[in-house]
């Protein structure tokens, strides 16, 4: 029987990450978003191990540890925190914690970034790379939808001289060029079954074989994939391999459409206006109240990319210090 674990953390992304990670290791995992919920679940179900964050509102991880131990002295309990210190570690161990671990955890897992076109999936990938232990290595990217299957294969895996007409010399593929770093596969949902099978081999065996060659090459690459497709439906329709989907979807990240996070619009507006004013040697401009209101109420089907394009146009067309609504495309109003 697999062990049963309860994850307690007020941060949803951390709960989801640990649930996915530990489930893939064969454990039965449940989550709670507060100490109160954790106590209720523990009293009703019982767990082989509880992993709780130290810093939570209302009840800290240490408070939860004391409460759980009062009722179940033999309960295995692990404290995790982003604010590790010797004192808190000692206190946790004195109260009966099995272990004390620091966040963030060092992870090199595959990530699948999902969201509509224009939401900024590539920026998320670059941010992940920059914050990882691979930051000093290369960041290589390709849009899988932009190339036909035969060309995509040779770009990904490289080829040997004479492999096909026009292959006049050996060429390294992008996977090899990304060695020691991160490879971002954009629009992975557009790959063919043959490419999907080869991607699965890369993830499983960490090797590639150039087109026209028989000798595999070992690689050390962290893969981040992105798609705007509903891959679950693509799997059901047999258009996307289920085994590849599960290998890509180790850590899923969903980026909401801009219309679902309108509170971000003012920040993005300030950023893009300053960016294009600076690029064009202008003093930073401001937007009229009418323009700001319209930008906040428009649905933005093209998401952040559409917003950026509209603001670049407005900056260039405006002849005043204040950007007016008339400087934007008519479709906005």
Image (cartoon, helix red, strand yellow):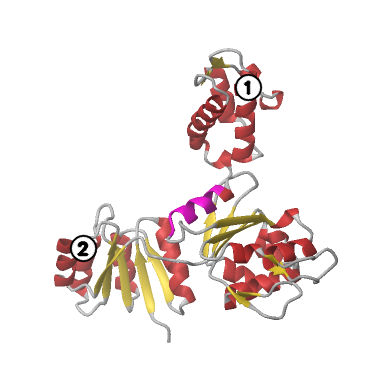
* x and y percentages locating residue 226 in the rendered image: 61, 57
Q: Which residue is mark 1?
A: 316
Dot 2 crowding, Cα within 10 Å, few <14, some 14–19, many 20+: many
**How far is mark 1 from mark 2, CA to CA?**
56 Å
* x and y percentages locating residue 291 in the rendered image: 57, 21
Of the two numbered discs 1 and 2 on the same chain, state the one appearing first in sequence. 2
Q: Say whether residue 238 is visible.
A: no
Q: Say whether residue 48 is visible.
A: yes
* x and y percentages locating residue 199 in the rendered image: 65, 70
Dot 1 crowding, Cα within 10 Å, few <14, some 14–19, many 20+: some
In the displayed structure, would residue 93 be above or below residue 311? below
In the rendered structure, the answer to whether residue 192 lies left or right of residue 201 reads right
Residues 199 and 58: in front is: 199
Please provide the residue range marked out in magenta.
123-132
| Helix, strand or loop under label 2 | helix
Which residue is drawn at the image coordinates 56% and 28% (left, top)? 279
Q: Which residue is mark 2?
A: 62
């Amino acid at each position: 029987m697999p062990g049963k674990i309860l994850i307690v953390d007020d941060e949803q992304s951390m709960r989801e990450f640990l649930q996915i990670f530990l489930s893939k290791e064969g454990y039965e995992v449940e989550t709670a978003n507060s100490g109160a919920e954790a106590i209720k679940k523990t009293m009703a179900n019982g767990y082989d191990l509880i992993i709780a964050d130290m810093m939570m509102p209302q009840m800290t991880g240490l408070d939860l540890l004391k409460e759980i131990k009062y009722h179940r002295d033999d309960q295995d309990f692990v404290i995790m925190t982003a604010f590790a210190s010797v004192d808190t570690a000692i206190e946790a161990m004195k109260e009966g914690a099995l272990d004390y671990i620091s966040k963030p955890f060092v992870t090199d897992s595959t990530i699948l970034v999902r969201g509509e076109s224009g939401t900024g999936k590539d920026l998320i990938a670059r941010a992940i790379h920059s914050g990882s232990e691979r930051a000093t290595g290369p960041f290589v990217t390709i849009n899988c939808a932009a190339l036909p299957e035969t060309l995509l294969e040779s770009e990904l895996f490289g080829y040997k001289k004479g492999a096909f007409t026009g292959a006049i010399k050996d060429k390294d593929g992008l996977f090899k060029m990304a060695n020691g770093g991160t490879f971002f596969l954009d629009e992975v949902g557009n790959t063919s079954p043959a490419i999907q099978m080869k991607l699965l081999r890369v993830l499983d065996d960490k090797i590639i074989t150039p087109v026209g060659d028989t000798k595999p090459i070992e690689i050390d690459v962290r893969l981040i994939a992105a798609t705007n497709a509903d891959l679950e439906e693509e799997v059901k329709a047999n258009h996307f391999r289920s085994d590849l989907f599960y290998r890509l979807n180790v850590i899923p990240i969903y980026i909401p459409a801009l219309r679902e996070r309108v509170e971000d619009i003012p920040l993005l507006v300030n950023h893009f206006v300053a960016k294009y004013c600076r690029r064009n040697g202008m003093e930073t401009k401001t937007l009229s109240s009418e323009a700001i209101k319209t930008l906040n109420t428009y649905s933005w089907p093209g998401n952040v990319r559409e917003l950026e394009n509209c603001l670049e146009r407005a900056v260039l067309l405006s002849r005043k210090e204040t950007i007016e609504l008339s400087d934007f495309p008519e479709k906005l109003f």
